[in-house]
Image (cartoon, rainbow, N blue to C red):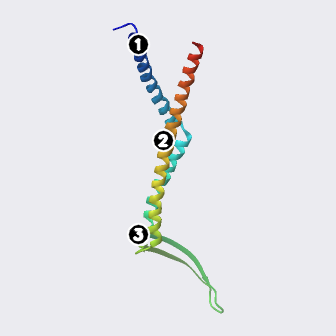
Amino acid sequence: MSIGKAPILLAMSLALTSQAAWSGELLSVVNDALSHDAELSAANAEIAVGREEIPIARSALLPRLDGGWGRTYNQIKTDNQPTAKYWQNGWMVTLNQPVFDWQLWVELRQASIASAKAELEYASAWQDLVLRSANAYLDLLAASQELSRATD
């Protein structure tokens, strides 16, 4: 091996080693950003809301059972008769099943679309955060290299 190739190989091996260390640091920066970003947390909350819309819309298509109880005090006054006073109790149970309601089906479809939209917005926010973190990290590395080049 000639003397001219040794410094080039040494420089290449140092560059590869430092790039591996940089990639580990970059992954650490991205992971920290993913766990602490407010926009991503907001997008994650929107996913939770979007996922809850589907069961709510589906529940409108299910049978509905309502019940109740009531109690009333009645008093009947008539001329030349004694006043009649009594309590009246009542129970009520109703069962409703929508046979076909187009609006409810449309709402279910819209809820599934809203949920998919929330998933896409989360993926977009995640990708945007990763790109912003990587750009900031690479800008920092470029500035560091420029500083070391200027001081040399």
Badge 2 element = helix
Q: Is residue 15 above or below residue 52?
A: above
Residue at horizontal 54%, vertical 38%? 37
Per the model, the C-alpha gap separating discs 2 and 3 is 42 Å
Q: State the residue lying farthest toward the left.
A: 1
The amino acid marked with disc number 2 is: Gln
Q: Give the crowd class for mark 3: few <14, some 14-19, many >=20 residues within 10 Å.
A: few
Along the line of sight, which residue is nearer the eye, 53 or 26?
Answer: 26
Along the line of sight, which residue is nearer the eye, 27 or 106?
Answer: 27
CB atoms of marks 2 and 1 within 8 Å: no
The amino acid marked with disc number 1 is: Leu
Residue at horizontal 51%, vertical 75%? 89
| Res 136 visible | yes
- x, y percentage for residue 123? 47, 45
| Res 53 visible | no
- x, y percentage for residue 75? 61, 82
Tag 2 residue: 127
Tag 1 residue: 10
Q: Earlier in the sequence, mark 2 or mark 3?
A: 3
Badge 1 element = helix
- x, y percentage for residue 80? 65, 92
The amino acid marked with disc number 3 is: Pro
Along the line of sight, which residue is nearer the eye, 56 or 65?
Answer: 56
- x, y percentage for residue 34? 49, 36
Tag 3 residue: 63
Quadrant, the C terminus: top right
Q: Is residue 128 above or below residue 20?
A: below
Q: Nearer the viewer, mark 2 or mark 1?
A: 1
